């Protein structure tokens, strides 16, 4: 190739760059203006106010620190022992206490200012710090009890899964344990009427594990979710001790009663009650706030129960589907 | 313990280290050579060519910036208000414009060079920048319209879920909203015939939410996916306004017609059409390009419709399975 | 507003801060003490011992490096070519070799010390390095064979999905490919009796893709999982060449035989065998260690087979459910 075409190419390119830059320089400001105008026109999905919201990232970081407190030695810090663990955990909890207080104060203020006429002008962030501090301490008080429950969950996972080689493997790897761990934390915050933050915690875990437990669900000891992807446990579920659930199981709501204006009525029991020692196999769907699965029952894979209770000590399976066996048209070979 | 065993131990260890190092030093180069040779022998899964591909990380970073533009004040930056938001969003969009142009240019070049005899020698990266810039600006032009649609989606989620305490909670936490947000972005790029990048965006969201919407799917306003894990919406789906879908729902294809050489024919309508005001409950499977779910219909949990349409205004549920209730062998107690 | 109220406010705030600080200063040490005491009382879920465990983060980083070796040019590093790729991959493998040896040594020591009376006092970390090095090299030796298999998987995905525009798109985006890639790595470590690490790898991929393949599963060439969320493939599955699986499919166990003490017996074949050229559609559940799906069979969506085999060349679908069509009470319009 001679040099000339290259030169030409460079010149052509430079012209192209300059035209492109000009084009963008002309059009981009109009785009920005249109987007900003849409913040006025469609104001329900922007938050342009001086009430800072809880930070998702900070809530997630706090949750990770709490996991470290619950299961010391497994995750971040190695070589902990009886002596140094107090320093390590004390420092972590001191930091969690401060940061969680800030986040809870933001969530409380957001709720207080949400539906008023002139939001974010009635209160200052400091107005909510005392209450937030009180809730944070009440929450941290519950950590030993949470550990007691989680130890039963770890044992239930080991006892219930032949693929588990040790309880350490459960703590290291099992998504079901991660889900119940974060749920037990989020549920305490939910009980303390902390807005937004419990749901941010549970949705993060939903993203990581595919297990969606609403922070409101009440779950007993020795709970085990195996595999877990697709599990949904609704806000008003009640689950007794020693229950085992497989992937894809939904404990959900059927339909939502509406008030006279056609708005959904919130706050009723919409999700099932599961009594102790129940096993629910993959992809079973159990719906309805009045549905009760009696103790010691087994619900088979793909069973669907809508507003239908089951007495204690029964085994429920779908009628074996009539399968059509026919020779396949032709084997799929290349 | 006397000192001698320690000394012996150290000596034994040093010998072991040196033998180990020698062993690795001998065997590792052969392993490297074998791996590199496999790049020649099995060349279909390596890209050893001077055409840089789009960067997954950069595409994800751009997507996150766009979410910030769509929902200012909720995520990264706090204390935005009517005055400073123009600076913030203007700066973000300027950066997105430049980076997205680069990524689209790479994707266009990759497509142009993919099936030629001497790939990556026919074009330079600059050859595609003008077209990429044009597509980027056309895409950004759509942002206000995307915001308009997303505001209807947020409202639909709030109206459709009694567990939602506020629309802010929806924007903060709901995986279904994240999925439709990224889908509406990816779909615009898909319509502009941008290769690879829309799919990288949607698969990232699939990973985070368990919701797999192909960028090609056409979805109307006020769309709500609740819980969402396991939802699959295929490339040629058409979904009208005000549709609500629960976890595990598949809107998929049945089988794929093949050409005379036995290769799959691409580009036909393979996925269902869902008309307005339809609700589809958990784990329902609706398959086939000719399948139409008529307006105002309700599809029950676990219903399976294969190449079978449903007239408007109907409720479809599976026949209640005959459940076998029998006393369980013995209660599962320790 | 006059200055006085502000002054008052500041004073009130300062008093509040100091009371809050005092309150926290009093209560936090008690919380820390209670948590630390629970490490003694509930000692099964803390690891306060000088045996460092494998690091989840390091195992994930090693896995990412190995993906870069398997598919050079697609992910992190651009502009690789035949000449520089040896340097790049050689450097990566050298680093992987060293780090993986360390992690495997930790896992081996953990297993050796797990059930002894005085854990972590019988061995030193160095005791396991030679064996770990041997296992690491044996593992790395398998990389070319793993690449050979993965090339067949990429082709199977392209051939089996009309939405795939190129094999590059499969390598870039397909969660099913990510799952089989990490599985083929983890399975080699499983075969080498490396504890913990294969499961850490597979659970990380489960989190990212919703696809849960136990490292023990034996899977042939040309394997394709489409969409994939909710797929579960158990430890003792055997899957022949050219099998295609859709989202939500479970290849699982039915129930677990227990020994005389009521403990689950581990190590038996509990999961199905799938012969070559089988296709299994969405949400099908196939359970039982004696269940065999014969070659060239097709299993339809939502089919449930429990301890029931299928002869070669058959198509299995659920009996078409009797659907109840009734006019919906009233269309759901606002």
Image (cartoon, coloured by chain):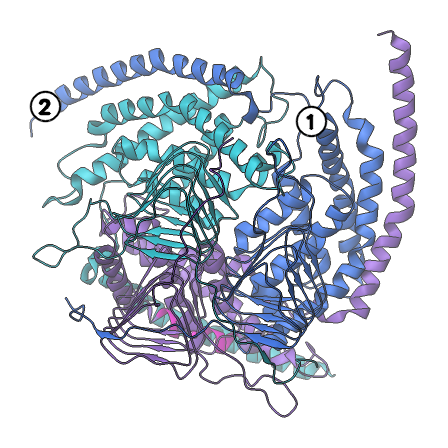
Chain colours: A cyan, B purple, C blue
* Vertical arrangement, residue C236 with respect to residue C11, above or below: below
Q: Is A138 on the left-hand or right-hand side of C277?
A: left
Which quarter of the figure has residue B276?
bottom left
Q: Residues within 10 Å of mark 2 (few under 14, many from 20)?
A: few
Report in which chain the residue with disc 1 lies.
C
> Could you say which quadrant of the image residue C152 lies in?
bottom right
Q: In this rendering, would C228 be left or right of A249? A: right
> Which of the pair B323/A122 is nearer the observer?
B323
Does residue A13 appear in this view? no
Q: Tell me the chain of label 2.
A: C
Q: How would you rate the neighbour count of disc 1 (Cα within 10 Å): few for under 14, some for 14-19, many for 20 or more?
A: some
- State the image coordinates of residue C271 (x, y, percent, origin top left): 63, 54
Q: Magenta includes B137? A: yes
Range of the magenta residues? B129-140
Answer yes or no: do the residues labelled 2 and 1 have beta carbons within 8 Å?
no
Residue at which label 1 appears = C114
Magenta stretch: dominant secondary structure:
helix
- Specify which label sits upstream in the sequence, 2 or 1: 2
Image quadrant holding the N terminus of chain C, namely: top left
- Asked whether, in this view, residue C89 is left or right of residue B221, the answer is right
Q: Is residue C306 magenta?
A: no
Residue A173 appears at what percent x and percent y?
Answer: 58, 40
Residue under label 2, please give it. C5
Q: Which mark is residue B99?
A: none
The image quarter in which residue B45 lies: bottom right
CA distance for labels 2 and 1: 65 Å
Residue A238, position as x, y percentages in the image: 32, 39
> Looking at the image, which is closer to me, B171 or C78?
B171
In the rendering, at what x and y percent does residue A293 appear? Answer: 35, 45
Identify the residue shown where x is 62% and y is 52%.
C234
In this picture, residue B46 sits left or right of residue B85: right
């Amino acid at each position: 190739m001679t040099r000339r075409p290259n030169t030409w190419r460079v010149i052509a390119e430079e012209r192209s760059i300059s035209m492109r830059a000009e084009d963008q320089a002309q059009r981009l400001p109009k785009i920005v203006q249109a987007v900003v105008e849409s913040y006025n026109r469609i104001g329900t999905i922007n938050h342009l106010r001086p009430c800072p919201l809880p930070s998702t990232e900070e809530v997630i970081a706090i949750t990770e620190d709490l996991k470290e407190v619950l299961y010391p030695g497994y995750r971040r810090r190695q070589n902990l022992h009886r002596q140094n663990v107090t320093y390590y955990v004390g420092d972590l909890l001191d930091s969690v206490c401060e940061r969680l207080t800030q986040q809870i104060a933001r969530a409380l203020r957001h709720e207080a200012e949400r539906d008023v006429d002139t939001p974010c002008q009635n209160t200052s962030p400091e107005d909510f710090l005392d209450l937030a501090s009180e809730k944070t301490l009440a929450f941290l008080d519950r950590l030993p009890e949470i550990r007691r429950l989680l130890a039963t969950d770890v044992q239930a996972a080991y006892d219930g899964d032949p693929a588990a080689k040790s309880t350490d493997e459960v703590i290291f790897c099992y998504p079901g344990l991660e889900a119940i761990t974060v749920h037990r934390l989020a549920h305490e915050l939910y009980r303390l009427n902390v807005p937004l933050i419990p749901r941010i915690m549970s949705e993060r875990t939903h993203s990581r594990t595919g297990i969606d437990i609403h922070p409101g669900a009440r779950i007993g000891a020795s709970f085990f979710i195996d595999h877990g992807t697709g599990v949904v446990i609704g806000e008003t579920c009640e689950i007794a001790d020693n229950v085992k659930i497989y992937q894809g199981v939904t404990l959900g709501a059927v339909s939502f009663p509406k008030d006279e204006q056609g708005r959904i009525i919130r706050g009723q029991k919409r999700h099932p009650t599961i009594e102790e020692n129940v096993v629910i196999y993959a992809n079973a769907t159990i719906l309805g706030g009045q549905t009760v699965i009696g103790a010691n029952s087994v619900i088979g894979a793909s069973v669907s129960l809508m507003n239908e209770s089951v007495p204690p000590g029964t085994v429920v399976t779908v009628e074996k589907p009539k399968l059509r066996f026919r020779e396949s048209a032709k084997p799929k070979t290349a």
